[in-house]
Image (cartoon, rainbow, N blue to C red):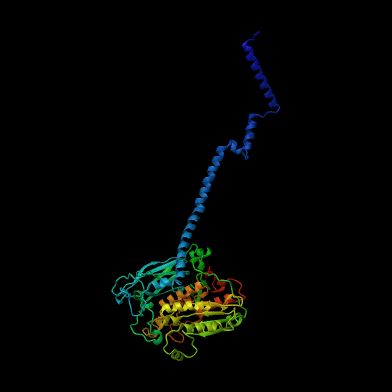
């Protein structure tokens, strides 16, 4: 029998009512939580890592948005300016590095120096376009541009050479003798651009007012001329003397201010990267000291530390033998009573030489020469006599220089060959009983560069005797000797910059016309280098004590 439909619906509603009754009963018994309690529970779980991504994605996105915004603000406020600054510093350091290496490589780039006057070094001969009509007039020449940078950066001044007729020069070959004085004093490096312009490049490390002095010594390569063939034999010279000694712009004052750099000094940034070494500039030269620096209060202060190669200590061992001209003799006299000769080495000795050994007075030696031409074999034999001396053992050192007399007397090609032969002499070997090749000279060679001169102090500027003794030739001969010694692996003591930069010039105490000799104090820094290089008791870095001015070094 069929039941009415409404009865079925009524049964369903009755079941639902029963279910509702059961749920209410369970809630009252706290077996099913209320909606309010469930919501509170879910909200509490939002604070946990597990609940956060499930229910509050928008809140997470909102928080992430603000994290990004705050991070961007921090970046723009602190990091980005620092990034820009560091990028600028890196760029500036690269520029600094370029100029740093230009100066240091210039002292060994003999080809660059020689190429300016290549084919134009024959005495009393000029190439077409290099005649007297194109000789520079220092008084008419002028400063073309100035770029003076703050302390610790390279500055530059450019000179434009003019002829006596007021024409702009378009070739090189001039020699400008330049000195900068102020709180410090130094001789900057001058680059011949070969187009009539001369770039004066220098580094100032003390603020203040500085003045530039520039004098034209020679023009149209006349300071690079080789002696004629008869020169070494007779010393008699025909022809006109061409030592100009003309001040730039007629001696007009040229002064400028170098301001303090209130940020980090670029020189310090450069050194902090470890770039102050010869290898950074692409050379393997074993300089005992950088050589470049400035004088301040009669103290030589280096621009930067050079790598001091492994110390070579002695304890009353070996002979320190000085070999050279009157400047070497003065150096020997200066060190004779110092620890170098009394404590470090067993003894010191000297060979006094001009071109040949000076065993007797000058006039006697000249007479013995008997009007003979230069004999390089005699020079080599005299050197062998020293380095093969029985007392010259493996602890012995010879400091050698073939300097001013060679520059004055020899053609450049002859000097080059002589330097090559001297190197070969020190490389000579013999074979022991086992057929092993060993060096005949067991000691150490240190090549000492030729010092600067002050030719303007000679009594007679047109006297033929110093005709070929020019700063232009000295720098050329120095450059080749350093280059060759670097290739041979010998150590180098470069004293040219400290002598050229000395504010007082040559020693006038005994002869006001002395153009070549300096006070012993000028080379005390070189003595200190040798002392700390060979001393068995010096433990710390050479350059922290070398010039008694730590702050100037780093």
Q: Is residue 493 left or right of residue 198?
A: right
At x 39%, y 87%, the residue is: 234
Question: Which residue is depicted at the point 58% across and 37% down?
Answer: 56
Q: Nearer the viewer, residue 482 or 280?
A: 482
- Name the image quarter holding residue 143: bottom left
Give me the residue at 41% from left, 85% from top: 232
The residue lying furthest to the right in this view is 29
Residue 244: image x %, image y %?
35, 79
Pinpoint residue 135: horizontal percent, then vertical percent.
32, 75
The image quadrant where one finds the N terminus is top right
For the residue pair 399 and 205, the one nearer the viewer reads as: 399
Q: Residue 286 location, x and y as percent?
A: 52, 72
- Residue displayed at 65% across by 29% down: 34
Location of residue 506 (image quadrant)? bottom left
Residue 334 in view, yes or no: no
In the rendered image, residue 134, in percent from the top left (x then y), is placed at 31, 74
**Residue found at the far top of this picture:** 1
Q: Is residue 99 visible?
A: yes
Give the vertical position of 115 relative to 49 (above or below). Answer: below
Is residue 495 depicted above or below 233 in this figure? above
Residue closer to the observer: 145 or 23: 145
């Amino acid at each position: 029998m069929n039941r009415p439909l409404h009865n079925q619906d009524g049964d369903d509603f009755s079941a639902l009512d029963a279910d509702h009754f059961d749920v209410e009963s369970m809630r009252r018994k706290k077996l099913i939580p209320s909606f309010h309690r469930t919501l509170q529970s879910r909200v509490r779980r939002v604070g946990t890592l597990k609940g956060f991504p499930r229910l509050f994605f928008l809140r997470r996105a909102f928080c992430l948005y603000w994290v990004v915004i705050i991070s961007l603000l921090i970046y723009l406020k602190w990091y980005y300016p620092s990034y820009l600054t560091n990028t600028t510093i890196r760029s500036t350091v690269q520029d600094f590095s370029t100029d740093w290496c230009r100066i240091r490589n210039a002292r060994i780039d003999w080809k660059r120096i020689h190429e300016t006057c290549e084919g134009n070094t024959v005495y009393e001969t000029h190439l077409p376009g290099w005649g007297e009509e194109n000789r520079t007039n220092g008084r008419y020449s002028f400063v073309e541009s100035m770029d003076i940078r703050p302390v610790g950066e390279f500055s530059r001044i450019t000179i434009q050479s003019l002829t006596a007729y007021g024409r702009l020069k378009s070739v090189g070959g001039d020699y400008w003798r330049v000195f900068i004085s102020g709180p410090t004093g130094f001789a900057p490096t001058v680059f011949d651009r070969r187009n009539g312009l001369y770039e004066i490049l220098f580094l100032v490390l003390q603020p203040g007012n500085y003045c530039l002095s520039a004098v034209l010594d020679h023009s149209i390569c006349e300071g690079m001329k080789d002696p004629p063939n008869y020169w070494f034999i007779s010393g008699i010279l025909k022809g006109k003397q061409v030592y100009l000694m003309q001040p730039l712009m007629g001696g007009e004052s040229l002064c400028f201010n170098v301001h303090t750099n209130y940020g980090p000094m670029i020189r310090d940034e450069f050194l902090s990267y470890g770039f102050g070494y010869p290898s950074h500039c692409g050379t393997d030269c074993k300089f005992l000291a950088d050589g470049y620096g400035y004088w301040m209060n009669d103290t030589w202060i280096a621009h930067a530390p050079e790598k001091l190669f492994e110390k070579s200590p002695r304890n009353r061992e070996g002979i320190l033998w000085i070999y050279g001209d009157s400047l070497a003799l003065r150096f020997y006299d200066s060190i004779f009573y110092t620890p170098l000769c009394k404590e470090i080495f067993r003894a010191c000795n000297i060979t006094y030489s001009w071109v040949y050994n000076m065993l007797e007075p000058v006039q006697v030696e000249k007479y013995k020469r008997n009007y003979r031409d230069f004999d390089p074999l005699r020079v080599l034999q005299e050197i062998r006599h020293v380095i093969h001396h029985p007392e010259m053992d493996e602890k012995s050192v010879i400091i050698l220089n073939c300097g001013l007399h060679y520059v004055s007397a020899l053609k450049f090609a002859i000097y080059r060959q002589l330097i090559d032969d001297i190197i070969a002499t020190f490389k000579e070997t013999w074979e022991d009983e086992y057929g092993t090749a060993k060096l005949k000279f067991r000691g150490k060679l240190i090549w000492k560069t030729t010092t600067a001169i002050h030719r303007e102090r000679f009594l007679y500027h047109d006297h033929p005797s110093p005709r070929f003794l020019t700063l232009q030739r000295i720098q050329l001969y120095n450059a080749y000797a350093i280059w060759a010694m670097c290739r041979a692996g010998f150590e180098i003591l470069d004293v040219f910059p400290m002598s050229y930069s000395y504010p007082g010039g040559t020693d006038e105490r005994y002869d006001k016309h002395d153009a070549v000799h300096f006070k012993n104090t000028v080379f005390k820094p070189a003595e200190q280098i040798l002392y700390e290089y060979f001393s068995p008791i010096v433990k710390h870095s050479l350059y922290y004590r070398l010039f008694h001015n730590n702050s100037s070094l780093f």
